[in-house]
Image: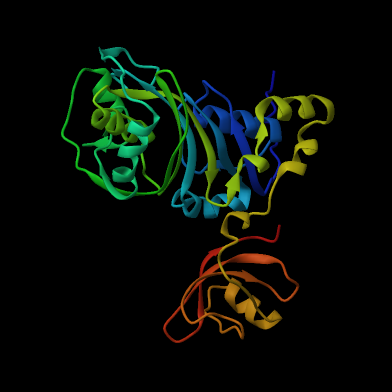
Amino acid sequence: MVQVKKVRRQVNGILVLDKPLGLTSNAALQKVRWLLNAEKAGHTGSLDPLATGVLPLCFGEATKFSQYLLDADKGYETLMQLGATTTTGDAEGDVLQRQPVTVDRSGIEAVLPQFRGPIEQIPPMYSALKKDGQPLYKLARAGEVVERAARSVTISRLELLGLDSDQARLQVACSKGTYIRTLVEDIGRVLGCGAYVAELRRTQAGPFNLTQAVSLTKLEEIHAEGGAEALDQFLLPPDSGLQHWPMVQMTEHGAYYWLHGQPVRAIDAPAFGWVRVQDNEGRFIGIGEVSEDGRIAPRRLIRSV
């Protein structure tokens, strides 16, 4: 019997998923890709299985811009369990140590300022960072601990939302590469009682937030009723993650040469930096960088979507 290969659709855009608890980011991506029957897909930075919330998924032409979302600032709400530390820095690990909790709300708020602004973090062993080609979490599972260099990150917002017995809820806004598990562990260390992440929810990734996010359950329900095409209503334009970039419009001739790899001048171009580019009919055709001579050099081009 001859097996017929399934023909996937050319789907272009960004779908903001509210990632459910327990799924890896890649498993969530593959599930949504299957529901959309999409040809090409990629995510914009992983969330731990323990974490829920905003996970922008890129499809088709939008995958060309996923790196710029990887670099974007993030927002989180986390539940900090006081009085214990674990092997992984979260609720999935084994408890290493328990200590009494005597700190109150004012005590927690007193230590938070030292974690705002630029800070240094040592990445956790249970992370996807690599050492000699091996992910750290694989080394950690084998019982190995290797030296990790501290990394600079920026915490632009850190607020205590509430304290209930030995659990504190925090709101965090931070730069890319920030480990919330490490932040919580470091706060627990300064408090003198230890702490780990009991819950973690990403509330923002770049320009995307929870108001735009759709649950996997909802996607499955709509797919069951109307098939893959019914999910297209949740797709945002491929450049929706770059809305803070200036937009310039090319003339018909300018767009033609630009799409063939030639730097082109545009009347409304800024003096420097990265820009989104439209053709003369207002269609998004890619991103470019303004060169020293004022022309816009093409960097990522897309097919008409």
Front residue (pair 209, 228): 209
Q: Quadrant of residue 145?
A: top left
Decide if residue 146 is in sight here.
yes
Q: Is residue 181 left or right of residue 159?
A: left
Front residue (pair 93, 101): 101
Say how many tags the image has: 0
Q: Residue at x 47, y 45 (%)?
A: 74
Q: Quadrant of residue 102?
A: top left
Q: Is residue 264 left or right of residue 186?
A: right
Residue 232 percent coordinates (x, y)? 75, 42
**Which part of the image, by quadrant, shows the N terminus?**
top right
Q: Residue at x 25, y 22 (%)?
A: 140
Q: Residue at x 40, y 30 (%)?
A: 105
Residue 277 percent coordinates (x, y)? 61, 70
Q: Residue furthest left?
A: 147
Q: Image height check: is 202 above or below 198?
A: below
Q: Image height check: is 136 above or below 259?
A: above
